[in-house]
Amino acid sequence: MSFELPKLDYAYNALEPLIDARTMEIHHTKHHAAYTNNLNNLVAGTEWEGKSIHEIFSNTDKVPAGIRNNGGGFYNHNLYWKVLTPGGHDKTSGKLHNAIVKDFGSFDKLKEEFAKAAATRFGSGWAWLVKADGKLVVASTPNQDNPLMNVSEVQGTPILGIDVWEHAYYLNYQNRRPDYIEAFWKLVNWDVVSDFFHA
Ligand code: MN
């Protein structure tokens, strides 16, 4: 069993003008592909070969740094492509919405907290909406770490994530990370986030 680069559910240009086609294509065919290939090469012939990505994350403190970084890169981008959609919209509904209101006060407060975590993550990393002990929390992680890793400061299941590595936005936004974060909200597939929330 090896890890496979997923196909996207939409075309590279489908998120334009908010995320440009060239960024999407490089991000998927170069960055995500490299994490996936590196992960397969690094686990081959080791005790981690054949283990699920969740098992690897549960043992992050024991795996070599290369498997941690490329395993995170493999998983994080799978989630990122899924939570984006050209038909995205800036609102929630149903039980997920109720949980957001309960745990953050309002949807706008969640957006504020998430955007702050994304904007203030120094250097490369991710910001997350995480289901942790039945509660929703915002977190951010460095590099390609994520809240499933047993070394993560906040532990839980990520249901929404934004990639704030410069490769995710630099061609279109250069140093304007907050503008990319603002655009991200217009692309979120809340149906998928809701499925992750209920899973
Ligand atoms: Mn990336």
Image (cartoon, rainbow, N blue to C red):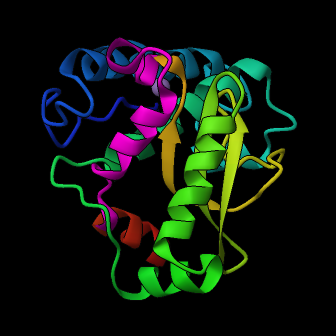
Task: Choose between 14 and 49: the one closer to the eye.
Answer: 14
Residue at 43% in and 46% down: 79
Residue 97 point in image, percent of width and height: 43, 81
Residue 27 point in image, percent of width and height: 36, 20
Residue 99 point in image, percent of width and height: 53, 83
Q: Which residues are magenta?
A: 167-190
- Residue 169 is inside the magenta segment: yes
Residue at 60% in and 37% down: 119
When asked about the image quadrant of residue 51, the answer is top right
Q: Is residue 90 visible?
A: yes
Residue 15 point in image, percent of width and height: 19, 36
Instruction: Decide: is 18 above or below 184.
Output: above
Instruction: Decide: is 45 above or below 79.
Output: above
On screen, residue 99 versus residue 46, left or right, reads left
When asked about the image quadrant of residue 29, the answer is top left
Residue at 15% in and 54% down: 87
- Residue 175 is inside the magenta segment: yes
Residue at 80% in and 30% down: 63
Identify the main secondary structure in magenta: helix
On screen, residue 21 versus residue 91, left or right, reads left
